[in-house]
Image: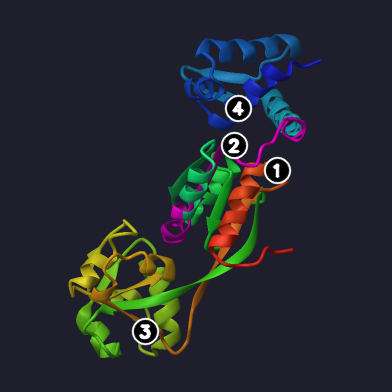
C-alpha cells in the first residue's frame, strides 16, 4: 500500500514545482521531500521524475500517479475536515477580493475578529484572475470576484451587485460629454473596463476611455479619488470605493440615466467542504452587504 505521507509530498511537489518551496509548505526539510519521492519510486519500482539539476519534469508514471494521487489526497483531506473539530469562531480564514469590495468588507471582518479574537482574517486585494488562481491553488479559502470564474475547479455564485459611479470634481454640476473631455480621465487598473461599461451605456459619443486625455493613474484603490478631488480629472469607480473616500465634499457623484452595476460573485474551491469559520465569514459578508442568503 502506498504511504499517504509520501504521496502527499509528491503531489505537493508537482503542484508547487520546486523542492524548497514544497518543503516550506509541508514544514519539512528539502532532503525530507526528496527522500519521500525516492521511497515512492523504490516502492513502485519506477522513476517518477526526470531530474535536471534543480529542475524536474514528470515521467509517464509520475503523471499517472499524480492524476490518481491528488484525488486520494483530497479525499483524505475532506475526511479529516469532516471528522475534526470545526469551531465557527476560531482559526485562519484567507480572503481575497478586488479593492472596492474590500474597502467595504474588511472593516466589518476586523470587527468580527475583535469580537472573536481566536478568529484570524487574512484579507488581500487582487484582480479577478489572481483570485480564481489562488482559489484553484488552495492559497485562499474564499474569494469575491466581479466576474464568474472560468476555471473548472472554482465554484461561483452571484451574491450582490455594486453600482458603477461617475465621479468628478465638486464644481462640475452637469457632466456633459464636453465637460468630461475638458477634464480628462484619472485612470486605474479597471479604469478602461469601468468607463466602457458606464459611459458606453450613457454617452453616444463614447467609444473607448482613450478618447479622453489621461490626467493621472493610481493602482491604489484608496487614492484614485485624490486627484479628482483636486480638480485634475474625472473617473469611474464602484460605489464601495467612492463611499470609502475620506473627503466626499470635494467630489461630486453623478448617477446617470442608465444605471450600470457589477455583479459580485462568491468564489470557493469546487467540491471542497467549507469549514464553519469560513461560513461565519461568508455570513458576515452577506450581512455587511445587506443581502439575503441565497438558497
The secondary element bearing badge 2 is classed as: loop
Magenta-drawn segment: 78-107
Q: Label 2 belongs to which residue?
A: 90
The CA distance from mark 2 to mark 3 is 50 Å
* Circles 3 and 1: CB atoms closer than 8 Å: no
Give the numbered dot on residue 184: none
Crowd band around label 4 with a 10 angstrom C-alpha radius: few (<14), some (14–19), many (20+): many
* Circles 2 and 3: CB atoms closer than 8 Å: no
Q: Label 1 belongs to which residue?
A: 272
Closer mark to the observer between disc 2 and disc 1: 2
Image x and y of residue 38, in percent: 64, 11
Crowd band around label 2 with a 10 angstrom C-alpha radius: few (<14), some (14–19), many (20+): some
In terms of sequence position, does the residue under pointer 1 or pointer 4 come before the other? 4
**Residue 13 falls in image quadrant:** top right
Q: In the image shown, does 218 or 169 lie closer to the viewer?
A: 169
Closer mark to the observer between disc 3 and disc 1: 1
Give the residue displayed 66% in from the left and 37% down from the top. Answer: 87
Give the numbered dot on residue 12: 4
Q: Label 3 belongs to which residue?
A: 206
For the N terminus, the quadrant is top right
**Residue 43 falls in image quadrant:** top right
Amino acid at each position: 500500500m502506498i504511504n499517504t505521507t509520501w504521496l502527499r509530498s509528491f503531489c505537493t511537489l508537482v503542484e508547487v514545482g520546486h523542492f524548497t518551496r514544497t518543503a516550506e509548505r509541508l514544514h519539512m526539510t528539502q532532503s525530507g521531500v526528496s527522500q519521500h519521492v525516492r521511497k515512492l519510486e523504490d516502492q513502485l519500482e519506477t522513476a517518477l521524475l526526470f531530474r535536471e539539476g534543480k529542475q524536474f519534469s514528470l515521467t509517464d508514471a509520475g503523471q499517472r500517479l499524480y492524476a490518481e494521487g491528488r484525488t486520494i489526497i483530497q479525499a483524505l483531506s475532506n475526511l479529516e475536515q469532516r471528522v475534526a473539530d470545526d469551531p465557527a469562531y476560531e482559526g485562519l480564514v484567507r480572503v481575497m477580493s478586488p479593492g472596492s469590495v474590500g474597502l467595504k468588507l474588511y472593516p466589518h471582518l476586523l470587527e468580527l475578529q475583535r469580537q472573536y479574537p481566536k478568529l484570524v482574517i487574512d484579507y488581500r486585494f487582487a484582480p479577478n484572475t489572481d483570485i480564481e488562481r489562488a482559489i484553484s491553488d488552495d492559497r485562499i479559502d474564499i474569494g469575491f470576484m466581479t466576474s464568474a470564474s472560468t476555471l473548472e475547479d472554482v465554484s461561483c455564485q452571484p451574491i450582490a451587485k455594486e453600482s458603477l459611479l461617475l465621479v468628478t470634481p465638486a464644481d462640475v454640476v452637469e457632466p456633459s460629454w464636453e465637460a468630461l473631455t475638458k477634464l480628462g480621465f484619472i485612470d486605474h487598473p479597471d479604469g478602461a473596463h469601468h468607463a466602457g461599461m458606464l459611459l458606453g451605456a450613457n454617452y453616444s459619443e463614447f467609444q473607448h476611455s482613450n478618447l479622453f486625455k489621461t490626467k493621472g493613474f493610481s493602482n491604489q484603490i484608496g487614492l484614485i479619488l485624490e486627484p479628482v478631488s483636486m480638480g485634475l480629472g474625472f473617473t469611474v469607480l464602484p460605489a464601495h470605493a467612492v463611499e470609502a473616500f475620506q473627503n466626499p465634499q470635494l467630489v461630486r457623484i453623478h448617477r446617470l440615466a442608465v444605471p450600470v452595476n457589477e455583479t459580485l460573485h462568491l468564489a470557493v474551491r469546487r467540491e471542497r467542504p467549507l469549514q464553519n469559520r469560513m461560513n461565519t465569514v461568508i455570513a458576515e459578508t452577506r450581512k455587511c452587504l445587506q443581502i439575503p442568503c441565497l438558497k
